[in-house]
Amino acid sequence: MPFRSLDPTPILTTTDRLQRRIAERFPDRGLTLVAAEVAALARDARDEVQRLTPPIWGLRAVVGLTVLVGAAVFLWIGSIIPLNQVGRAAIGSVEGVEAAINTLLLAGLGLVALIRLEARVKRQRVARRLHELRSVIHVIDMHQLTKDPVTLDPDYRPTDASPPHDLDAVGLSRYLDYCSELLALTGKLAALYAQAVPDEGVAQAVNDIELLGSSLSRKIWQKISLIDTKPAPRRKRMPE
């Protein structure tokens, strides 16, 4: 079913379009560079997901070869030690039985670790990508942090330490809206990794990123609502 999974191509298309929209409206602002970075992360996510989705056949071959070599070593050891001596030693002493059990347990744990090696490798690769997305979310938040609707108030008086405010109501609203869209797209990029690597740890990390982006986006929309609810300036009445 086409609507039961995320497709990286439309997400990349939307990200590139948003980058162009921001560059056209705010060509000289840092948000344009941030949008370009998000677009680059989208391309990286598309390529990385394509590599993570199929099995890592080379690693599976190494694991299979290791298991075969280990089994061959056990068989070789068993062939050079007389079985009757091993049986008498194991039955005749508690230490022998305990040593045999420990050997079997260690061999079983080693086999499980080898089987799970592929999932661990994929999880580490996804963790690095998710860390990049989390960092970009904080960068986006830094860009909208000083964009305060209070600066549109006619009675607002900046201090010497106040950041420059040269956006009108329309420009400020669009700037904040672009920040919210960038946050939403970072969440979608994180979801691509959860889809490619169905792991509980990855799913939890992706959920944390989506919650972080949603929380910051709500704060941004609170600012936008303050802009939208501001009364329009009164126009001078033209003489009849």
Image (cartoon, rainbow, N blue to C red):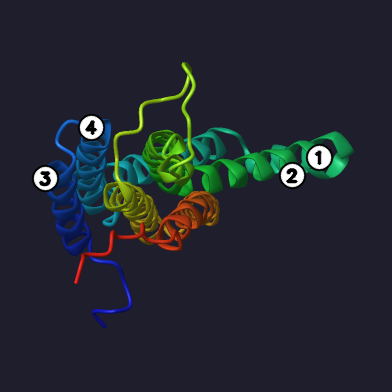
Rendering coords of residue 220 (x, y %) = 46, 51
Question: Could you tell me if the residues under marks 1 and 3 are in contact, i.e. CB atoms within 8 Å?
Answer: no
Tell me the CA gap for discs 1 and 2. Answer: 5 Å
Q: Amino acid at mark 4?
A: Arg
Tell me the CA gap for discs 3 and 4. Answer: 11 Å
Q: Which residue position is annotated with label 4?
A: 29
Which numbered mark, 1 or 3, is in the foreground of this view? 3
Residue at 52 percent across and 39 percent down: it is 74
Tell me the CA gap for discs 1 and 4. Answer: 70 Å
The quarter of the rendered structure image containing the C terminus is bottom left
Question: Could you tell me if the residues under marks 3 and 4 are in contact, i.e. CB atoms within 8 Å?
Answer: no
Left or right relative to 237: residue 209: right
Which numbered mark, 4 or 2, is in the foreground of this view? 4
Tell me the CA gap for discs 1 and 3. Answer: 74 Å
Left or right relative to 140: residue 7: left
Local crowd size for mark 3, using a 10 Å CA cut-off: few (<14), some (14–19), many (≥20): few
Q: Amino acid at mark 1?
A: Glu
